[in-house]
């Protein structure tokens, strides 16, 4: 079903609503926030700022007073704040939004505690281990809360852990032993997360926010685009799995978000990826013995403008079709 905003835009484009009545139609449709909506917005904004400020203030306060504080006092301050956040989250009278804020602050404080432990005892662990253990410890809270922001935070921790791991140890197999191992790991993780999120949201009744799915999609698209760019930049690399995976990824993106579940944001991201890779490919073809031929920059400029205009026209037509 079309949203009230899309229906109103469609009526305005069709001329069903006179221009002088557009403001009144927007007000009747409830698209303008009411005073109560503004109060709720600022209330939640201040609540989130307060919770995040509490978590980060503990980190900066301990770091600033590191020399004046003993080891047990440092741990005591962080653990006391962590217990306070968890206590607020499990308190029966706490509102759902306050529980989410408290669990988010507690999840951040777990990372502060792990960093403090490694710094105080000089464990010598690799950086990726900190983020991986951090993700494991907060996973029960993330699972219980079922809060999109916490899921994105948890996935971000896994991204950092996998990226740092591959940069430290390299890949286990063949091509993954190259410098692109981290990109392969991030692409695999985020693509799997995107598939699970889409399946759970639309087939298992999971509650999810569209912005969170879009963030995960960006996490999948950026690495595979960088892998395609890396293939074109590396003149000595004849073949790579990205030659087959990148077209399959684009085809899946088009099939799911154009025919299965239309989503302009995803398709626009795919267009940006294709334009970027195609532009670099054209630049490589026009490059001859390390020197630009006459008119090469003009041809690339014309190609970029043509591809950009074609993408905009296609997306606008698709938007009109979805609005009807």
Image: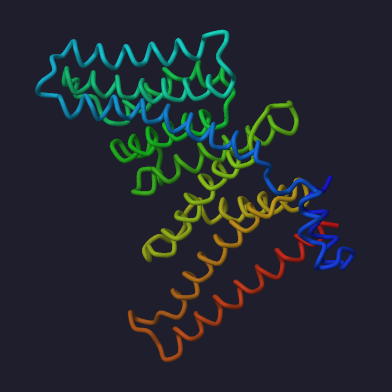
Drawn side of residue 110 relative to residue 298, left or right? left
Residue 54, x across and y down, in percent: 36, 26
In this view, 192 is above or below 282: above
- Furthest toward the top, the residue is 92
- Furthest toward the bottom, the residue is 294
Which image quarter holds the C terminus? bottom right
In this view, 291 is above or below 309: below
Drawn side of residue 39 relative to residue 186, left or right? right
Which of 245/30 is in front? 30
Which of 142/159 is in front? 142
Residue 303, x across and y down, in percent: 56, 78
- Furthest toward the left, the residue is 67
Q: Which colouring convention does the figure follow? A: rainbow
In this view, 230 is above or below 289: above
Residue at image x 47%, y 49%? 223
- Furthest toward the right, the residue is 16
Q: Quadrant of residue 316?
A: bottom right
Residue 16, x across and y down, in percent: 90, 64
Drawn side of residue 258 relative to residue 234, left or right? right
Task: Count every numbered label the image shows and give the total.
Answer: 0
Which of 1/140 is in front? 1
Which image quarter holds the N terminus? top right
Residue 159, x across and y down, in percent: 43, 36
Residue at image x 73%, y 26%? 204
In this view, 290 is above or below 122: below
Q: Quadrant of residue 317?
A: bottom right
């Amino acid at each position: 079903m079309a949203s009230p905003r899309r229906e109103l835009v469609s009526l305005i484009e069709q001329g069903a609503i006179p221009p002088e009545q557009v403001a009144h139609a927007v007000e009747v449709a409830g698209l303008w926030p009411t005073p109560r909506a503004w109060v709720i917005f600022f209330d939640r904004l201040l609540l989130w700022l307060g919770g995040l400020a509490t978590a980060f203030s503990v980190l900066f306060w301990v770091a600033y007073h590191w020399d004046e504080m003993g080891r047990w006092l440092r741990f005591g301050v962080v653990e006391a704040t962590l217990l306070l956040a968890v206590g607020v989250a499990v308190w029966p009278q706490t509102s759902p939004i306050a529980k989410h804020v408290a669990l988010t602050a507690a999840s951040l404080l777990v990372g502060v505690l792990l960093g403090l432990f490694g710094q105080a005892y000089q464990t010598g662990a690799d950086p990726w281990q900190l983020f991986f253990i951090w993700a494991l410890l907060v996973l029960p809270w993330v699972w219980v809360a079922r809060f999109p922001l916490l899921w994105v935070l948890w996935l971000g921790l896994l991204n950092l852990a996998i990226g740092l791991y591959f940069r430290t140890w390299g890949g286990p197999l063949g091509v993954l032993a190259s410098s692109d191992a981290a990109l392969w790991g991030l692409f695999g993780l985020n693509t799997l997360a995107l598939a699970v999120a889409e399946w759970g949201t639309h087939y298992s009744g999971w509650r999810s926010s569209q912005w969170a799915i879009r963030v995960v999609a960006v996490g999948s698209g950026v690495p595979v685009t960088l892998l395609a760019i890396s293939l074109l930049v590396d003149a000595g690399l004849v073949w790579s799995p990205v030659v087959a995976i990148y077209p399959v990824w684009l085809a899946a993106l088009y099939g799911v978000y154009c025919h299965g579940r239309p989503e302009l944001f995803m398709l626009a991201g795919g267009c940006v990826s294709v334009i970027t890779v195609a532009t670099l490919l054209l630049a490589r073809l026009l490059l001859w013995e390390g020197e630009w031929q006459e008119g090469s920059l003009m041809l690339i400029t014309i190609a970029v403008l043509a591809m950009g205009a074609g993408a905009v026209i296609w997306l606008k037509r698709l938007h009109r079709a979805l609005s009807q």
